[in-house]
Image (cartoon, rainbow, N blue to C red):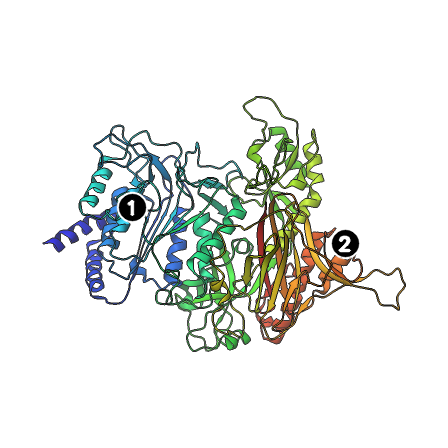
């Protein structure tokens, strides 16, 4: 009788979700089979809501797609074990009933359960009641699709975090991962004004005046009666520590005892899609993960990426109550976890000759500019040789991108002769990356600028070839042009948290009603002012734009270098660490390629050094001394070069020079020399025997360094550097290139030339339909390791 009543309840729920009775019978059979299974299962409930009435979101359904494809094609979840509720399906009752039917009644001890929610978070008022009947305020909640349709007197139809915690604790397994891409702080509007129209905050605008609905309170009481929420009887129930297993959350609850943390969860628009910052950055990292990497390492890298986008405004948190270090990436759970992937084949056309490839494993900065004709290779099946797969195109394993839209691309096999059809589920890895030569920098305007200011700025930017303005709500920007007012800059003694923000400066529409003196500059997307871009007071807009041209060229150079990042896909065996020497010796950050050839087993470096690193971007104090330690673990020498931006926004390059030959005239300048690491050699930069000492200097802010490795010398790069840097004697030192954009373009050309030589010798060149306005970079020829840190 109990089972019949249970199936009847399921029938009502599935009917509400639009699932037929036939589907219910099939589900019932599958449920019965699951009960008899002895091996651990992997179950997931994914919830994403865009279609809120009045104030919709845009990226939550994409978040569900990102998680579903990752779990299915990367971590071996069976598609029927993943239940997705999106938009109108995701009512409060359907969410809670789906949890009971899909997770609670199916999970068994040892199973893995994943719960994901993308949508609005909020807080609800607390009704009066007898002690113990209600939750201590404030009540933090997730907003279902019907949660904003509140009738006065009926309460707010939200899913309380306490209810969710009770449901999760009711599961018979401790292998639970919960991901909440929402935030709970007050916001007047979810549309973020910086940058305009592109970013949204996932906090419900305003807080409901009604208490939690009677139905929600009744459901919660029922859970308590069943004894499902008794493990934490003295816990502050409105917090996040009540969740079992591992909780990944975009932000802490606003009243959490975590001073300085941001309390906003953002979704952002990229080229062709919108997604939550936490979901997108985390799933991208997990596609590239290896058996040696834990969930914690992937999460830290995702948090670092988010901080680069929005600073401290969003601060993701990982809370682990009781779970093994490798809960999510354990070989017993991640059945198809090899050396990482950029995506998988998720659909077929033309009898398997054309495939739809999901490419969410590519770095976000790269995917937006990933060119047509890029080459991918299918991940070798067990028993196949990776070297053979990459060394010839006589196999059916190489695919060519023929079109791309958002996160997916259409691909075709390079050779049809004797090839088996493509199969859904085959993972793909990058082989040749096509990048545009004519890439520009996109700048958005601060919406607080006056009409005349905006007209003048638009006119000034229209005269610049490589730089253009973003179309509001249609195109993501790289940087922001806005008004600032001169104000005392933070010092390490007064502030060690963040550089100046645009929000800290009065704007033209300030409450004082007075127009402040005009002063303009550039901001990052995280609203951090780039110190070197501040102009004079009373500066005209057009004058400011033309004054910023050198800085814009520097920022475009940095953008080009970021497009070479390929830590996950490179086949070179290199790694590097950033170390602080004084005031104390400490490894700050490490990076390494994850797919070196020959494969000598999974890398152990990340796993053994992951626990001593914090979340997000690491901090280095002003005045500290640093060095890089570079390892070449391959069997061939590799050339390297180090470039980047310091915390002031200036380009930097580390170079070595040698004295001019004696046969030349005495006044001849020293020449730059190639920097190389021999096979199985380790070097430090700067060299311990060198007089150059790398000291972290003001101002506070983000600094980034790109370590670029190549199989071939950086011939054009050194030539470009020699025209803009004056080498002094035989030494190794940092310099400021006068023409950073030309240097970055030379690096891409050197990598393109190295890849051309490799392609010609490995039968790749004949299938590359390469246009003259593109670079083609082969992952066997180069590696770029990125280091981002905060100067404090």
Based on the displayed image, in which of its 4 quarters is residue 324 positioned?
bottom left
* Residue drawn at point x = 19 percent, y = 51 percent: 11
Residue at the outermost front position: 584
- Residue denoted by label 2: 724
Name the mark nearer the viewer: 2 or 1.
1
- Residue denoted by label 1: 164
Does residue 216 appear anywhere in the picture? yes
Based on the displayed image, in which of its 4 quarters is residue 216 positioned?
top left
> In the picture provided, is 261 more to the left or to the right than 746?
left
The one nearer the camera, 147 or 655, is: 655
> In the picture provided, is 521 more to the left or to the right than 201?
right
Q: Position of residue 656 (x, y in %)?
A: 73, 62
Based on the displayed image, in which of its 4 quarters is residue 449 positioned?
top right
Q: Position of residue 524 (x, y in %)?
A: 58, 43
Q: Is residue 182 above or below residue 177?
A: above
Q: Position of residue 354 (x, y in %)?
A: 45, 65
* Residue drawn at point x = 27 percent, y = 57 percent: 173
| Mark 1 neighbour density, 10 Å: few (under 14) some (14–19) many (20 or more) | some
């Amino acid at each position: 009788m109990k089972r019949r009543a249970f199936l009847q309840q399921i029938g009502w729920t599935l009917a509400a979700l639009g699932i037929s009775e036939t589907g219910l019978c099939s589900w019932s059979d599958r449920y019965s089979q699951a009960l008899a299974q002895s091996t651990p299962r992997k179950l997931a409930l994914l919830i994403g809501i865009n279609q809120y009435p009045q104030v919709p979101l845009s990226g939550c359904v994409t978040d569900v797609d990102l998680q579903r494809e990752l779990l299915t094609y990367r971590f071996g979840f069976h598609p029927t074990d993943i239940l997705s509720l999106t938009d109108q399906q995701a009512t409060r009752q359907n969410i809670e009933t789906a949890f009971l039917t899909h997770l609670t009644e199916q999970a068994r001890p040892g199973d893995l359960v994943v719960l994901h929610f993308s949508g609005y978070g909020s807080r609800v008022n607390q009704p009066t009641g007898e002690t113990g009947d209600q939750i201590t305020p404030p009540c933090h909640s997730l907003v279902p699709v019907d949660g904003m349709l509140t009738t006065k007197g009926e309460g707010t139809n939200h899913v309380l975090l306490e209810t969710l915690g009770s449901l999760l604790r009711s599961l018979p397994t401790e292998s639970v991962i919960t991901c909440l891409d929402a935030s709970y702080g007050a916001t007047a509007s979810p549309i973020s004004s910086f940058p305009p129209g592109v970013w949204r905050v996932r906090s419900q605008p305003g807080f409901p005046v009604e208490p939690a609905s009677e139905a929600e309170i009744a459901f919660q009481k029922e859970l308590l009666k069943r004894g499902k929420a008794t493990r934490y009887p003295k816990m502050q129930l409105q917090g996040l520590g009540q969740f079992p297993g591992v909780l990944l959350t975009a932000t802490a609850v606003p009243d959490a005892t975590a001073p300085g943390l941001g309390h906003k969860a953002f979704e952002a628009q990229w080229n062709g899609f919108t997604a939550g910052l936490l979901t997108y950055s985390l799933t991208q990292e997990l596609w590239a993960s290896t058996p040696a990497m834990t969930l914690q390492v992937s999460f830290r890298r995702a948090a670092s990426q988010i901080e680069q986008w929005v600073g401290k405004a969003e601060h993701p948190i990982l809370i682990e109550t009781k779970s093994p270090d490798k809960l999510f990436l354990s070989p017993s759970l991640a059945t198809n976890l090899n050396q990482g992937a950029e995506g998988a084949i998720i659909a077929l056309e033309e009898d398997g000759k054309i495939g739809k490839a999901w490419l969410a494993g590519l770095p976000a900065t790269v995917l937006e500019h990933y060119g047509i004709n890029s080459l991918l290779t299918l991940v070798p099946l067990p028993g196949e040789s990776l070297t053979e797969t990459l060394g010839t195109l006589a196999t059916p394993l190489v695919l060519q991108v023929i079109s791309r839209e958002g996160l997916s691309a259409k691909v075709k096999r390079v050779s049809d002769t004797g090839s088996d059809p493509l199969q859904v589920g085959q993972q793909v890895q990058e082989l040749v990356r096509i990048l545009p030569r004519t890439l520009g920098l996109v700048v958005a305007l601060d919406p607080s600028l006056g009409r005349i200011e905006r007209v003048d700025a638009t006119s000034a930017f229209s005269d610049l070839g490589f730089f253009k303005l973003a179309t509001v709500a249609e195109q993501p920007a790289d940087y922001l042009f806005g008004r600032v007012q001169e104000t005392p800059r933070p010092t390490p003694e007064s502030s060690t948290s963040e550089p100046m923000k645009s929000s800290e400066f009065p704007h033209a529409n300030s409450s004082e009603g007075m127009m402040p003196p005009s002063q303009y500059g550039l901001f990052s997307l995280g609203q951090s002012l780039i110190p070197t871009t501040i102009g004079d007071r009373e500066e005209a807009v057009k004058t400011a734009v033309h004054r910023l041209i050198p800085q814009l060229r520097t920022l475009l150079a940095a953008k080009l270098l970021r497009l070479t990042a390929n830590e996950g896909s490179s086949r070179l065996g290199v790694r590097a660490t950033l170390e602080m020497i004084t005031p104390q010796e400490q490894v700050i950050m490490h990076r390494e390629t994850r797919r070196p050839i020959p494969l000598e087993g999974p890398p152990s470096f990340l796993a053994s050094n992951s626990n001593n690193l914090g979340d997000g971007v690491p901090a280095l104090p002003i005045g500290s001394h640093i060095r890089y330690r570079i390892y070449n673990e391959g069997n061939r020498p590799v050339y390297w070069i180090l470039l980047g931006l310091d915390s002031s926004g200036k380009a930097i390059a580390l170079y070595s020079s040698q004295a001019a030959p004696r046969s030349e005239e005495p006044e001849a300048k020293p020449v730059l020399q190639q920097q190389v690491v021999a096979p199985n050699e380790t070097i430090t930069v700067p060299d311990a025997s060198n007089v150059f000492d790398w000291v972290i200097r003001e101002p506070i802010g983000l600094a980034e360094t790109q370590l670029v490795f190549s199989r071939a010398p950086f011939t054009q790069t050194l030539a470009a550097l020699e025209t803009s840097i004056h080498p002094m004697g035989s030494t190794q030192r940092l310099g400021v290139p006068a023409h950073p954009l030309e240097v970055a373009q030379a690096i891409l050309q050197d990598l393109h030339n190295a890849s051309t030589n490799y392609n010609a010798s490995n039968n790749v060149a004949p299938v590359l339909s390469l246009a003259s306005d593109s670079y083609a970079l082969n992952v066997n020829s180069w590696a770029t390791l990125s280091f981002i840190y905060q100067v404090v």
